[in-house]
Image (spheres, rainbow, N blue to C red):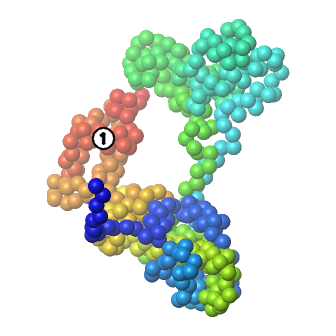
Amino acid sequence: MLQQKLQLKLLTKLSPQQIQTIKLLEIPTLELEERIRQEVEENPALEIIDDPITSSNGETQERSEEGSEGNDDLDGANFEGDNYLNDYKTEDDIPEYALEARSKQEAKMEGFSYISSETLQEHLLNQLRFRTLKKELKEVAEYVIGNVDEYGYLRRSAESMVDDYSFQTGKIIRESVVEQAVELIKSFDPAGVGANSLEECLLLQLERKTSTPQIETAKLIISKSFVDLSQKRYDRIVRDLGIEEKEIKEAISEIIKLNPKPGNAWDSSSNVSNIQITPDFIVENENGELNISLNQGAIPELNINRNFAEMLDEYSNNKSNQTREMKEAAIFVKQKLDSAKWFISAVKQRHETLRSVIYALVEAQKEFFLSGDETKLKPLILKDIADKTGYDVSTISRVSNSKYVQTEFGIFPIKYLFTDALQTTDGDVISTKGIKTVLEECIKNEDKKNPLTDDRLMEILAEKGYTIARRTVAKYREQLNFPVARLRKEL
């Protein structure tokens, strides 16, 4: 049986402008530029200002307090009070971020790009094209190249490739042809490509080098005692091969120059073909005073399209004899103007939020920005910055995600400035990054013939006032990319 009931509910709902602001806040500078250009393409009421200071149409807008969502009821459509033409015509309304000098920002901007023009397979195929080969061998070689992995290794046997090639092409080939193609690819650049194992990869690279006593000793060690070499059991190499310790040291100096992953420079799987890191914030030290700026050099300034504003203004002033089509057009124009209004406001609010957060971060980690010393980093969590700025913790998290700050000591992720706390034996609270810095110094300055074990590192840290467990020492050591003591041993 159907029944009617009245219910009163209190719901929290984000407005379209709030959703837009949140999305813009969490993206870095490079993505923001692309997002702005995409919005300009989709919304004809939004345009880019070439020069916001001198342009006659340099009209930007203050944040709307309550944007309209559009009204599909043509008879009830109300455009009163929305004089967009007047809202955007004065230069006084241009937000502060639009007036910042771009030339200064561009001069300070420091980005890093890693560009690879071709894949490893394309690089090998280009070399194959310059070889004069029989048609069958060339086709098989092309198939073999397709089986080379991103590191440059060919981990498949000739027998398995014969079966797959025959199944895919319907052609019967001899295993010797595949083996011939594999040997051909091993002669290509980079040296070591086409190897089946790390041992073979290193030997292929050594074969390309001019023969010297050190090179020959290195070949002997890899071919006869590769397991002992990988485990750094040098005493066994001396005993089994009858080589003096000095000769082993010279041979190892040649081995460490080799590339264990020759295909890494063309690694397409890691998406490094077009990666650019551009700092979102710039902090400069001028005689002990920290100057903070946002890197807005590549972000275009936005404006409401004057033609759209005039169209709506004209309709609002003269509604007599308006057809249904003209009312529909007016509603469309108003929706686009509202959308442009919200977007400009969201960009401005993003700028204000980022500025507030970076100022609070620099103030909290001032000693680090002045010295560049990691041990000067103070314990800091997202809530600390949220309390200082008045924003929610989730907002601080979005600001710190995928964003970077440029200092005179290098470019750091914003998340790098947030560290956990640890109390010393003296009762002082220090950052875990400070402990890692001390741990790194201990390992770098250790006796390489007798490297420090995790237990010994724990004792040294305890002597310095950092009482942590051995498993914590091991965790920090691994985070610093240092292997265990046995694998750090050198001759």
Is 149 on the left-hand or right-hand side of 321? left
What is the x, y in percent for residue 325? 67, 76
| Residue 463 in view in this figure | no
Quadrant of residue 74 in the image? bottom right
Residue at 58 percent across and 54 percent down: it is: 276
**Vertically, is 21 above or below 87?**
above
The quadrant of the rendering that contains the C terminus is top left
Is 58 on the left-hand or right-hand side of 278? right
Say which element carries label 1.
helix
Q: Tell which of 450 and 18 is nearer to you.
A: 18
Query: Dot 1, how many residues are within 10 Å of its Cα: few (below 14), some (14-19), or many (20+)?
Result: few
Is 293 on the left-hand or right-hand side of 438? right
Q: Tell which of 413 and 95 is nearer to you.
A: 95
**Vertically, is 226 above or below 336?**
above
What is the x, y in percent for residue 170? 72, 14
Residue at 27 percent across and 36 percent down: it is: 454
Q: Tell which of 404 and 314 is nearer to you.
A: 314
Marker count (numbered): 1
Amino acid type for the residue under numbered disc 1: Lys
Identify residue for label 1: 475
Specify the farthest residue to the front.
1
Specify the farthest residue to the bottom.
317
Residue at 20 percent across and 55 percent down: it is: 423
Residue at 71 percent across and 30 percent down: it is: 124
What is the x, y in percent for residue 212? 62, 22
| Residue 166 in view in this figure | yes
Quadrant of residue 2 in the image? bottom left
What is the x, y in percent for residue 103? 63, 74
